[in-house]
Image (tube, coloured by chain):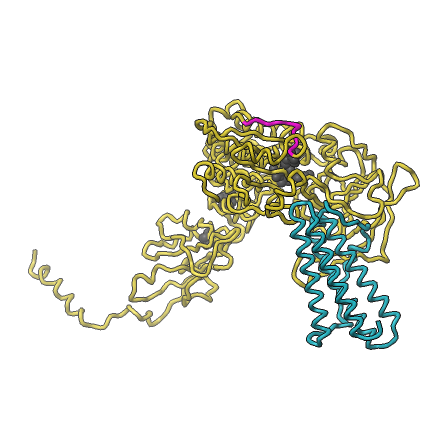
Chain colours: A cyan, B yellow
């Protein structure tokens, strides 16, 4: 990945893969109501993809310096494997962890590259992922950690 | 009669064509009213809650409660405001004295000239008046109340005594205490709208004043077949809106309810309460013998339907039996409610799980309607490293063991994780089992979803609260029968979107503490696995909860749902109301075939 466009293409592909992953989970989910949850997750990923498409076309910008709150909820949770009979708590953990992994990937890449333009794109992408992580962590905080 | 007497009335006519002195004009020299003069009314409409106490007390019928444009009724506000009729008012000031909100007062303005007599009927505070800014006039002295601002205190076991056993902590009112407390009610009915079951609070409180407890019981059973239970553990939304609480403490509605039930022997219930109507030949299956299921069972049975309840546990009551501990809700009180429901012929199949012993689809096939109220009985996992440590236990299991007379073997030092009712009960139960208890909670005390009364009682009983504490790992301790909890301090961060503040772990401020047992009580979810996918796919379910339509009905016409598994409030009274509401919907559906 040597150009801004290549990086964005990669990121767009990742969001598409995530959307497909959740759409597939929705097909397989057995628990009542989980289909809708996965479809919502999938739609959320499609929104992320569309935003990056807009960025690539120059209609929107990434902000490498924006402050995003890190609730650190997923950082200390165990990994869970997605499966057909997954609960909504675990589904949220899967989602939080995926966003966290993406955030770390882009943050690491930003450290590795030297060219400022590329660094900015990676940092901007990392911030996007941090926002997605915050979205799922806030959901987790509201719905799962209700009494906590 | 002299001639003068006969003619004199005609002299009046000579004034008929003169300019009047008073109409439209104030006296030339305006004399201010005395500082505490009882002149025209002012009502701070934003503070007024429309309780109507002014209307009730007015001996001249000079006040009406009227709907005002732009004001809507909402929790604790009837949306009505007092309209004064100065053709009737005698300026006695009783309305000011009784005003629960302290919003009403009188100015020392006393002169008002208008050619339109209708102007003298006005909604104070909602119409501009020349005396609006006036500060003088009659105010009720803040220390003077027509009803005592403080409630009659409920006698409780002292904390040293309460932690020594599972004896009920609240002792109950004596008749004298209950009557004094009942006298504080201004009978406004604001609470009726807020109570999920819309219980007729003012009238049953009135029955205490009259000493007619049988009538009080009848009134309660109209919308709630669990009054002995709710008289002890209700979340009492009603009290949170009682306007007597605006300038003092709200009427102790819950304790008055308990008082009434405690006065009537169960043996008299059959004579006092309504009986079953003629058999309809319809059969209804209910899944779950918690308050939701049994409330539906009660009202359906009264209508003459045959009701069968399927319950996976060995006893009825759901979380009220297996969750709420007996020092808050003793078994005999819960049994009093349940036994009356069963006495009407409601059949309960115990140790019978739907999904395991009978297929859910069989219920839909074989009964005229099905009501589901299976509650939230799956504890949320913390999902931290080491959670499967043998010394980590969930709060529901602890409470379930104690309710079943089993020793949960928690040892002498216990950490409870969480801030809801389950956490408070787990903590207080652990104290009763002889443990030192530390409650760890991610947020602040004021964010705890547990009832404040429970929090205070837990503190009084010696539970130590560590707030803004986030558990991150359970580790093996030096001794194999202990567990070490790693937890970090949290800072509260304002939610930019306006939600409740969120705790953020401070990784540099971690702690290690060792306990005999860590009890996790961070929330519960549902288990709907008994519904096969081909049925659940047709239903609206979100975050593990059903989303019912009107009358608690689902898209499958025969299926009605309620209780914790279908509402957002997850308390007993909401489950009871859901059951009653569904019963009305089922009866209507069976009677007319109409959907909700
Ligand atoms: C520790 C604790 C303390 C609480 N304190 C209070 C309080 O102070 N005040 C208050 O108002 N509320 C309190 N609550 C909440 C209250 O208990 C619940 O809101 C209420 O019991 C919900 O009623 P329900 O009928 O929806 O479900 P539940 O009471 O949970 O009853 C559901 C029933 O369904 C049965 N069931 C489940 N699945 C099946 C199946 N497949 N087949 C057959 N049977 C099944 C269960 O065994 C259970 O008996 C507390 C809850 C807990 C856990
Ligand atoms: S008594 Fe006070 S609060 Fe109640 S309606 Fe009258 S003015 Fe409003
Ligand atoms: S209990 Fe309070 S809210 Fe209810 S009727 Fe009495 S005074 Fe009004």
Q: Is residue B339 above or below residue B39?
A: above
The answer to whether any part of residue B479 appears in the image is yes
Q: In this view, does B54 lie above or below B519?
A: below
**Which quarter of the picture shows residue B119?**
bottom left
Q: In which quarter of the image is the N terminus of chain A?
A: bottom right
Of residues B126 and B543, the one nearer the viewer is B543
B413 on left or right of B159: right
Q: How many marks?
A: 0
Of residues B259 and B277, the one nearer the viewer is B277
Q: Where is residue B166 in the image (x, y as percent from the top left)?
A: 71, 31
Residues shaded magenta = B346-354
Q: What's the residue at 72%, 35% (across, down)? A: B399
A70 on left or right of B38: right
Of residues B300 and B186, the one nearer the viewer is B300
Q: In which quarter of the image is ligand 1?
A: top right
Q: Where is residue B319 in the image (x, y as percent from the top left)?
A: 65, 36
B543 on left or right of B223: right
Q: What's the residue at 51%, 38% (across, down)? A: B182
Q: Does the magenta stretch include residue B28?
A: no
Q: Is the magenta stretch mostly helix, strand or loop?
A: loop
Q: Where is residue B475 in the image (x, y as percent from the top left)?
A: 88, 45
Residue found at the very far right of the displayed protein: B478
């Amino acid at each position: 990945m040597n150009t801004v466009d290549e990086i964005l293409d990669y990121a767009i592909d990742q969001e598409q893969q995530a959307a497909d992953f959740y759409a597939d989970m929705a097909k397989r989910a057995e628990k009542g109501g989980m289909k809708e949850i996965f479809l919502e997750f999938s739609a959320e990923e499609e929104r992320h993809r569309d935003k990056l498409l807009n960025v690539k076309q120059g209609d929107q910008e990434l902000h490498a310096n924006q402050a995003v709150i890190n609730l650190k909820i997923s950082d200390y949770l165990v990994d869970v494997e997605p499966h057909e009979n997954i609960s909504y708590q675990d589904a949220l953990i899967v989602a939080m962890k995926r966003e966290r992994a993406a955030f770390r990937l882009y943050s690491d890449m930003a450290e590795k590259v030297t060219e400022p333009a590329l660094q900015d794109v990676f940092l901007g992408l990392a911030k996007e992922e941090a926002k997605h992580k915050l979205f799922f962590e806030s959901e987790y905080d509201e719905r799962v950690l209700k009494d906590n | 009669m002299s001639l003068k007497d006969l003619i004199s009335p005609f002299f009046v006519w000579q004034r008929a064509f003169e300019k009047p002195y008073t109409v439209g004009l104030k006296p030339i020299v305006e004399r201010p009213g005395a500082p505490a003069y009882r002149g025209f009314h002012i009502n701070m409409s934003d503070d007024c809650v429309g309780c109507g106490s002014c209307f009730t007390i007015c001996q001249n019928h000079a006040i009406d409660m009227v709907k005002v444009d732009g004001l809507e009724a909402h929790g604790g506000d009837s949306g009505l405001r007092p309209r004064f009729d100065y053709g009737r008012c005698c300026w006695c000031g009783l309305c000011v004295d009784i005003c629960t909100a302290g919003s009403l007062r009188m100015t020392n303005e006393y002169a008002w000239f208008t050619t339109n007599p209708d102007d003298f009927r006005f909604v104070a505070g909602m119409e501009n008046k020349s005396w609006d800014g006036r500060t003088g006039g009659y105010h009720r002295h803040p220390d003077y109340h027509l009803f005592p601002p403080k409630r009659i205190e409920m006698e409780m076991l002292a904390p040293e005594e309460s932690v020594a056993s599972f004896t009920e902590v609240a002792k109950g009112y004596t008749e004298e205490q209950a009557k004094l407390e009942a006298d504080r009610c201004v009978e406004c009915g604001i609470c009726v709208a807020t109570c999920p079951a819309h219980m007729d609070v003012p009238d049953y409180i009135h029955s205490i004043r009259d000493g007619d407890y049988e009538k009080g019981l009848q009134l309660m059973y109209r919308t709630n077949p669990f009054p002995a239970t709710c008289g002890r553990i209700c979340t009492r939304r009603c009290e949170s809106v009682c306007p007597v609480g605006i300038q003092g403490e709200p009427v102790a509605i819950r304790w008055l309810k308990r008082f009434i039930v405690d006065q009537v022997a169960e043996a008299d219930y059959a004579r006092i309460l309504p009986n079953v109507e003629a058999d309809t030949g319809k059969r209804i299956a209910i899944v779950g013998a918690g308050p939701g299921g049994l409330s539906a069972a009660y009202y359906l049975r009264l209508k003459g339907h045959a009701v069968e309840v399927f319950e996976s546990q060995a006893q009825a009551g759901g979380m009220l039996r297996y969750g709420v501990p007996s020092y808050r809700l003793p078994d005999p009180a819960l049994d009093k409610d349940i036994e009356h429901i069963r006495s009407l012929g409601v059949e309960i199949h115990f140790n019978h799980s739907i999904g395991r012993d009978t297929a859910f689809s069989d219920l839909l096939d074989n009964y005229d309607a099905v009501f589901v109220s299976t509650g939230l009985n799956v504890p949320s996992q913390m999902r931290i490293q080491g959670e499967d440590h043998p010394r980590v236990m969930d709060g529901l299991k602890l409470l379930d063991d104690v309710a079943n007379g089993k020793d949960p073997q928690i040892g002498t030092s216990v950490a409870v994780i969480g801030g809801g009712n389950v956490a408070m009960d787990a903590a207080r139960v652990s104290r009763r089992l002889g443990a030192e208890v530390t409650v760890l909670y991610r947020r602040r005390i004021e964010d705890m979803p547990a009832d404040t009364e429970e929090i205070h009682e837990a503190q009084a009983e010696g539970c130590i609260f560590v707030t803004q504490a986030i558990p991150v790992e359970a580790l093996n301790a030096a001794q194999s029968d202990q567990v070490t909890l790693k937890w970090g301090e949290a800072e509260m961060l304002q939610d930019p979107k306006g939600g409740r503040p969120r705790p953020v772990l401070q990784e540099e401020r971690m702690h290690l503490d060792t306990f005999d047992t860590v009890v996790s009580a961070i929330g519960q979810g549902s288990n709907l696995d008994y519904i096969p996918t081909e049925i659940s796919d047709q239903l609206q379910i979100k975050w593990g909860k059903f989303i019912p339509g009107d009358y608690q009905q689902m898209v499958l016409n025969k299926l009605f749902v309620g209780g914790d598994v279908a509402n957002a409030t997850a308390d007993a009274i909401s489950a009871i109301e859901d059951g009653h509401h569904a019963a009305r919907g089922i009866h209507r559906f069976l009677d007319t075939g109409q959907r909700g």
